[in-house]
Amino acid sequence: MLSGIKIVEICGIGPGPFCAMHLADLGADVIAVERENALPLGMTGKPPANPIHRGKRSVVADLKSPEGRDLVLKLIESADVLIEGMRPGVMERLGLGPQDCQARNPRLVYGRMTGWGQDGPMAHVAGHDNNYIALSGALYHSGTANEAPSSPITLIGDIGGGALYLTIGILAGVLNARQTGKGTVVDAAIVDGSAHMMQLMLSLQGRGLLKEQRGKSVHDGSHFYATYRCADDKYVALGSMESQFHALLLNKLGLEDDPRFAKQWDMSRWEELRGLLAEVFASQPQEHWCDLLEGTDVCFAPVLSPREASQHPHMVERGVYFERDGLLQTSPAPRFDGRVQVPGSIPARGEHTAGIMSALDVGDLAAVWKP
């Protein structure tokens, strides 16, 4: 879908590389500029193949050297997009900030990925996914009143509020550049994106379904929208919000005549009812509840690990997961015209350095970028 879109990625950690991978999955030509000796967090020795680099081509460069800076500037002269995830001001100090790059290529969309944003009191402070979503308000209702808020690792912040918002901003910038001939600087901050993702939940305020106190709202306090432990220490998730789905749940569990469940939206009873359902689900293993409830309109699903999810019949039929080179991966999304996109292979670090540099030296753009 994005064939012909040329992207230079200044490799960092987390959401920036995911954004570049997502665009590569959709057909963009991504050249990843990596540091030669950089190692993933907690790693020593030769780094393993990293699925987040699939579909890209890799060059190595020292951006602090004139040669490394010149390589990037030559690449962006014919690129549509640059992606970077440095702290604010770092790219400017390297001579690769938006003004430097857009002076070479006025149509360039300059995508900036940070946690706190390019400005503000926290802009230059270190942080990670859980810090950003804690400050934005997105972490607050994750969990119940009796437990500490728990971050769904990387999903709300790095990916949802970060990488996907950068992706949207880049695509909007590319469309604008095609119409106006002018590039854009995209400031994608995880605090901004994860807060924006809260808008649907904030819409519940007017109906009284979102409370300031944790554990008192429909998504973190009700008995019918909750996660329950089973007898085998596995879990199931309910989302029986609508009255007909709630009635079906009670029918399936043999509780339709229990007067305690008669008033679904009596919030004063939610804690008690949540405890009652916890006892019910703890009485049988997960498989029992899947046999009884899965595939019905109860709004039910088992809580699966990624490996278990990859083997679930629905996920198998849709081809959501695949395994390559011994690594479990997820297929590109969304899909177009009913087809699952086949992602590219994972490059070795610096695999394409010599070829791309040689092509740049002689001005052979056809050899620099994929046709």
Image (cartoon, rainbow, N blue to C red):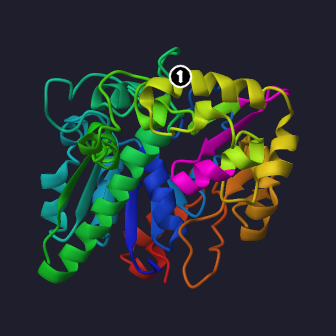
Residue drawn at (56%, 27%) of the image: 41
In the image, 349 versus 210, the foreground residue is 210
What crowding class fits label 1: few (fewer than 14 Cα within 10 Å), some (14-19), or many (20 or more)?
A: some
At label 1, which amino acid type do we have? Glu
Q: Is residue 120 shown above or below 184?
A: above
Q: Please state the horizontal and vertical placement of residue 130, each as a whole percent of the image.
A: 43, 27
- Check if residue 237 falls in the magenta segment: yes
What residue span does the magenta drawing correspond to? Answer: 229-248
Residue lying at 22% horizontally and 38% vertically, measured from the top left: 117
- Across and down, in percent, residue 162 comes to 37, 45
Identify the residue at image location x=79%, y=30%. Answer: 230
Question: Does residue 71 appear in the picture of this structure?
Answer: no
* x, y percent for residue 252: 76, 48
Residue of label 1: 271
Say if the magenta span includes residue 285.
Answer: no
> Could you say where residue 80 lies in the image, as x and y percent from the top left?
30, 70
Which of the pair 368/51 is nearer the observer? 51
Secondary-structure class at tag 1? helix
Decide if residue 202 is on the left or right side of residue 278.
Answer: left
